[in-house]
Image: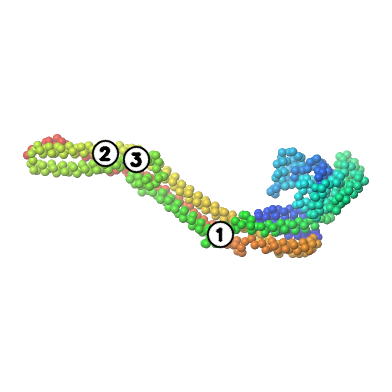
């Protein structure tokens, strides 16, 4: 696969990236593809590693011609040094967001024991330093945090690896790292960074290095970054020539022009990315919340015969009970026109009962009792009076003994007058109670109306809460639908892999071995064969249909206006006959004798 073929594949992968970025389930895989594509189109990437941070940082400083990195310390984060007309620092956070800093803030990321640096390193993935330097027009210099923190994915982002050492000797742990890099398909350049360039010393170092780890190294190169930096400060060109830094610079320029390893590295990374994508796609059906979303939506797919229908019917039944209660409470005071009717309402509606209402009820009961008592007394009086009048006529008509008739009538009159006094006493008691009732009427009506209004609000609140829970379930369903619809891009991706990308891999014979090519084509087939949803499943899930079928309405206030209690003085005053007049005893004594 020549470079033009690589870029052709990159173009196809860009389309694939725009497809899969719509799905949050494979966001990590999507981000890795974006990173792969960025690296494919970027300048040549050279990674500097080594256990001696002073030599590594000094070498980078010499290459860019300035003291940029603190030589005594490793940085807090991985650093990418790249070309830029405007010089600044860009921090790339772990969530993908970026923030720009002025160059004077570089010490935040490169000097140990800074409080801000400790915080930043927790949240930052790497930083990019943009410098105006000719070497960086074709190369990006990658500086690793430390040798033990160099990961496989970070190494594979590099086109070349420069292992920097002052002595060329490496320990067993370092040798394991070198073997690992070699296993990734990369042979690092061993840069011997001497205090002062010495050809004989260099040859001896190279000889020892070749004996111990030469098969894992591409080439040995000797330089003196300290001499190069000294020449920069002293303007002594010979010192720079003696440093042999120009040899390393030329090597970097040659590598950048030739891009020898990019084709191979990109091929490896693309294959690894496809393997990652296959694993991600295969796991989707069993991952949460996809599995729960799919299972829940299956319950609602056929609404007429689904759990959603049962839930709706249950909630509608409860809501109808609330509506019936609301309608009753809102109208129950409408027809209350008497104290007796009010007492019956208070008795049947517990929420109307409080201390003030209880006192009013007690007073009303006493009032009604007195009214009944008065009416009874009055009726008895009338009946007795009528009998008295009959006796009086009978005694006079029969011409009884005057004395005896007078005695009988006087006794009867005395009884009537006692009954009249009882009527009067009860009547006056009624009027006193009426006065108290009239004084309390306004307050009691306000309390009853307010209590009824509060009860209506409680009923409405319960109904609205039911609607909230119901609509929350509807919202969950809508979220599930939206989440599932994210996977429409997976179908698009599967089709794109088969129709567009598979053909490129079939022709990519120079980048992959025959076995690798067969493996990649098999991976594409495996990805395309993953069935996430049943055929036509999404088409049966209409959000509009769900909202129409599943929604409930609470419109009690609009349907049932609150009828308040409004009793007048006429309504609460009982209609009772006036107090009867007493019997005139003198009149009886003056009756004509026969």
How far from the left and from the top, in percent, is residue 381?
21, 41
Q: Residue at x 68, y 57 (%)?
A: 280
Q: Within the image, what quadrant is residue 15 found in?
A: bottom right
Q: Is residue 9 left or right of residue 207?
A: left
3D distance between C-alphas at marks 2 and 1: 74 Å
The colour scheme is rainbow
Q: Is residue 302 left or right of residue 424?
A: right
3D distance between C-alphas at marks 3 and 2: 19 Å
- Dot 2 falls on a residue whose secondary structure is helix
Quadrant holding the N terminus: bottom right
How far from the left and from the top, in percent, is residue 219?
87, 51
**Which of the two marks, 2 or 1, is nearer to us in this view?**
1
Q: Which mark is residue 299?
A: 1
Task: Give the residue furthest to the left.
Answer: 594
Q: Residue at x 93, y 46 (%)?
A: 200
Q: Nearer the viewer, residue 562 or 503?
A: 503
Q: Is residue 337 left or right of residue 19?
A: left
**Which of the two marks, 3 or 2, is nearer to us in this view?**
3
Q: Which mark is residue 580?
A: none
Considering only vertical position in the picture, is 404 above or below 327?
above
Q: Which mark is residue 427?
A: 2
Q: Which mark is residue 362?
A: 3
């Amino acid at each position: 696969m020549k470079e033009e073929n690589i870029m052709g594949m990159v173009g196809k992968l860009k389309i694939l990236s725009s497809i899969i970025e719509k799905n949050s389930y494979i966001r990590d895989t999507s981000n890795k593809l974006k990173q792969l594509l960025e690296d494919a189109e970027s300048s040549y990437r050279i990674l500097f590693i080594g256990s001696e941070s002073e030599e590594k940082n000094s070498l980078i400083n010499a290459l860019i011609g300035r003291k940029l990195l603190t030589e005594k310390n490793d940085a807090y984060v991985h650093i990418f040094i790249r070309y830029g007309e405007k010089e600044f620092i860009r921090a790339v956070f772990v969530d993908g967001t970026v923030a720009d800093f002025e160059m004077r803030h570089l010490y935040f990321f490169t000097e140990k024991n800074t409080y801000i640096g400790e915080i930043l390193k927790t949240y930052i993935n790497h930083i990019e330093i943009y410098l105006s330097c000719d070497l960086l027009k074709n190369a990006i210099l990658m500086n690793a945090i430390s040798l033990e923190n160099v990961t496989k994915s970070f190494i594979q982002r590099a086109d070349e690896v420069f292992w920097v050492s002052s002595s060329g000797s490496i320990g067993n742990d370092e040798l394991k790292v070198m073997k690992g890099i070699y296993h990734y398909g990369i042979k690092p350049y061993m840069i011997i960074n001497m205090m002062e360039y010495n050809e004989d010393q260099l040859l001896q170092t190279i000889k020892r290095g070749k004996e111990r780890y030469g098969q894992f190294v591409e080439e040995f190169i000797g330089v003196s970054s300290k001499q190069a930096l000294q020449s920069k400060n002293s303007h002594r060109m010979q010192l720079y020539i003696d440093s042999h830094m120009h040899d390393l610079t030329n090597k970097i320029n040659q590598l950048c022009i030739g891009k020898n390893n990019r084709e191979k590295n990109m091929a490896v990374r693309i294959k690894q990315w496809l393997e990652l994508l296959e694993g991600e796609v295969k796991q989707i059906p069993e991952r949460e919340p996809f599995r729960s979303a799919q299972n829940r939506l299956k319950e609602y797919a056929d609404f007429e015969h689904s759990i959603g229908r049962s839930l709706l019917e249950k909630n509608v039944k409860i809501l109808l009970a609330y509506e019936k209660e609301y309608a009753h409470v809102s109208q129950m005071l409408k027809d209350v026109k008497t104290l007796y009717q009010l007492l019956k309402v208070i008795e049947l509606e517990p929420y109307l009962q409080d201390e003030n209402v209880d006192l009013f009820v007690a007073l009303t009961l006493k009032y009604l009792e007195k009214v009944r008592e008065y009416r009874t007394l009055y009726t008895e009086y009338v009946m007795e009076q009528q009998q008295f009048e009959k006796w009086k006529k009978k005694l006079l008509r029969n011409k009884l003994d005057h004395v005896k008739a007078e005695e009988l009538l006087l006794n009867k009159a005395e009884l009537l007058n006692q009954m009249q006094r009882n009527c009067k006493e009860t009547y006056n008691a009624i009027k006193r109670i009426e006065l108290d009732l009239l004084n309390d009427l306004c307050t009691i009506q306000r309390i009853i109306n307010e209590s009824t209004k509060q009860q209506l609000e409680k009923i409405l609140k319960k109904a609205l809460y039911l609607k909230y829970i119901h609509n929350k379930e509807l919202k969950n369903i809508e979220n599930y639908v939206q989440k599932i619809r994210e996977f429409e891009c997976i179908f698009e991706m599967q089709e794109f892999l088969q129709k567009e990308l598979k053909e490129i891999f079939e022709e990519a014979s120079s980048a992959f071995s025959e076995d690798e090519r067969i493996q990649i084509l098999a991976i594409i087939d495996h990805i395309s064969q993953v069935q996430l949803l049943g055929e036509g499943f999404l088409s049966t899930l209409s959000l509009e249909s769900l909202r129409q079928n599943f929604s409930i309405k609470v419109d009690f206030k609009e349907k049932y206006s609150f009828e308040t209690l409004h009793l007048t003085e006429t309504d609460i005053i009982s209609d009772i006959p006036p107090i009867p007049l007493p019997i005139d005893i003198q009149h009886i004594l003056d009756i004509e004798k026969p």
